Image (cartoon, rainbow, N blue to C red):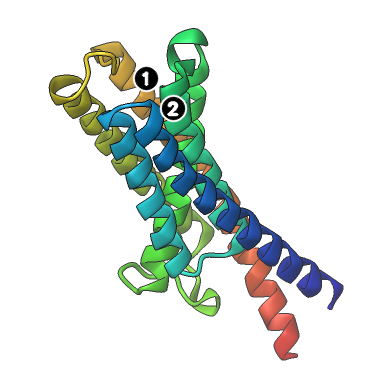
Amino acid sequence: MHTRKHNNDAHVRGRLIGDAIRVAAVISIGMAVLWYGIPEILGFTVVALGLIGIRVAHLAGPFDAAFGATILLATWSGVAGLYEAITWWDIMVHFVTAGSSAAVLYLVLASTEVTPGSPVSKALPSRSIVVLTFAFGITVAVLWEFAEWAGNAFISKGIHVGYVDTLLDIAVGGVGAIIAGILLSLWKDQTSALQSSARQ
């Protein structure tokens, strides 16, 4: 009972943090309108719409908060010039963002029955969750690189692209997705065990 209450508290806290991040994303759009340009406005608008979509999908609070924090951080990092100022920052952001995005994609697609794995009582084996999450993460990483190329070609030459950079970003995104898949499978196992004990 105590563990179930702890999980519910974590969900509520995560949801509140996620909502605060959504508000921050909307404020970021206003800041971009006032002080930045079209690329920043578009970037924050996409982030805000994505976070609103995640809210509608009713994700577990911790996943909601983690995803929102990572993609808003990734967007602000570009605006603040952190990718150029800190050599390893780009790798770290690709690692955590691809991982969190892959986990969110798995949960959303499973909950809508696009892929198997939901409800928790019908959860896939851990290895299947890891493989699917890895596939989603690699897909996100590749699409991200397409977006960077398009941004460089049509919006701003300040968006850095390059062969080695692209391959490295995809690779670290894949590693992040594998770790996210492992954590997701552990969370699924724990949640399934809690539901089973509740039925006894």
- State the residue position of label 2: 172
Query: Considering the numbered disc 1 on the image, is that residue within a helix, a strand or a loop?
Result: helix
C-alpha distance separating marks 1 and 2: 6 Å
Residue type, numbered disc 2: Val
From the top left corner, tell me how far across and down residue 23 is, in percent: 52, 52
Height in image: 162 above or below 99?
above
Quadrant the N terminus occupies: bottom right
Can the viewer see residue 63 in this picture? no
Q: Could you tell me the amino acid type at mark 1?
A: Leu
Is the C-beta separation of discs 1 and 2 under 8 Å?
A: yes
Residue drawn where x is 35% and y is 74% of the image: 113
Residue at the far front in the pictured view: 34
Numbered marks: total: 2
Answer whether residue 12 is visible to the viewer in this image: yes
189 in relation to 63, above or below: below
The residue positioned 57% from the left and 64% from the top of the image is 60
Q: Which residue lies furthest to the left in this view?
A: 154
Is residue 163 left or right of 70 when viewed as pictured?
Answer: left
Quadrant where the C terminus lies? Answer: bottom right
Above/below status of 16 relative to 25: below
Query: Which residue: 51% across, 39% down?
Result: 70
The residue carrying pointer 1 sits among few (fewer than 14), some (14 to 19) or many (20 or more) residues within 10 Å by Cα, namely some
Where's residue 103, x and y in %? 47, 52
In the rendered image, the vertical position of residue 127 relative to residue 91, given as above or below: below
Residue positioned 49% across, 77% down in the render: 119
Q: Position of residue 145 (x, y in %)?
A: 26, 29
Which residue carries the number 1 mark?
A: 168
The local secondary structure at tag 2 comes to helix
Q: In this view, does 162 lie to the left or right of 55?
A: left
